[in-house]
Amino acid sequence: MNRFPRVMGMRSGYDPVEVDALIGRIESTLGRGSHVLQPVTADEVRRATFRAKRGGYQETAVDFALEAFVVALETQARRPVRLAMAEPTGELLREEWFETQAARVERVAFRPGRMGTGYNEDEVDAFLDRIVATLRGTTAYPVTAQQVREAKFSTVLFRPGYLIADVDSFLAGIVDVLQQRLDDQNAPPTSSAWFRREPQG
């Protein structure tokens, strides 16, 4: 069974046997395959190379599929971090933790897109600025977790752009943090304890 279209004529493409073997491991790792194979990590998929074979799989089709698989693998491996709503976490108070997350968004660096395609850098950077402002509580129009999940960016061709898989993966990882921040902001203020005085009789 051909998983991907093949190159035409006498051209060479990716070795189908090697590609199919990797895809099989990916599907097994994601729980989609019928056989239990050696698990594979997202980093292994990123580093994967294939021998050239005449009449092999089209490189572009395989590359795009592997980008999607990288996102799926990273999403599966990620375990959401839930913090106590009112208690310190380690040595960091909750507000300080949100600040560290905002700083992480500011420092993130994405790899350039493959084969001359990628997300528009200006659009991604502007969206990340909104996320930072939301985490710091400095905007009247915070970004919601749902907006992050549904975020769409223009793709560029033959000019600098961010690797699509890197951006999608990073945004998927920041959704839970944003939701916690918005939950905090929408929570009713904590009032001081009060006691009902029993009537004297």
Image (tube, grey):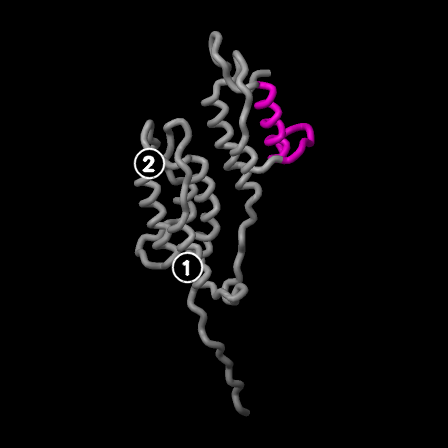
Q: Nearer the viewer, residue 200 or 151?
A: 151
Horizontal and vertical percent position of residue 16:
57, 18
Start and end of the magenta stretch?
A: 16-39
Q: Which mark is residue 120?
A: 2
Quarter that holds the C terminus: bottom right
Mark 2: secondary structure: loop
Horizontal and vertical percent position of residue 153:
35, 36
- Mark 2 is on which residue type? Asn
- Mark 1 is on which residue type? Glu
Label 1: few (<14), some (14–19) or many (≥20) C-alpha neighbours in 10 Å: some
**Horizontal arrangement in the rendering, residue 162 relative to residue 15 (left or right):** left
Tag 1 residue: 99
Q: Residue at x 50, y 66 (%)?
A: 86
Q: Nearer the viewer, residue 42 or 192?
A: 42
Q: Residue at x 54, y 64 (%)?
A: 90
In the figure, 102 relative to 52: above or below? Answer: below
The span from disc 2 to disc 1 (Cα, nearest Å) is: 26 Å
In the figure, 21 relative to 195: above or below? Answer: above
**Horizontal arrangement in the rendering, residue 37 relative to residue 69 (left or right):** right
Horizontal and vertical percent position of residue 91:
52, 66
Magenta-colored stretch includes residue 165: no
Q: Residue at x 38, y 37 (%)?
A: 162
Who comes first in sequence, dot 2 or dot 1? 1
**Horizontal arrangement in the rendering, residue 88 relative to residue 27 (left or right):** left
Magenta-colored stretch includes residue 31: yes
Q: Residue at x 55, y 24 (%)?
A: 50
In the figure, 171 relative to 160: above or below? Answer: below
Q: Nearer the viewer, residue 1 or 67?
A: 67
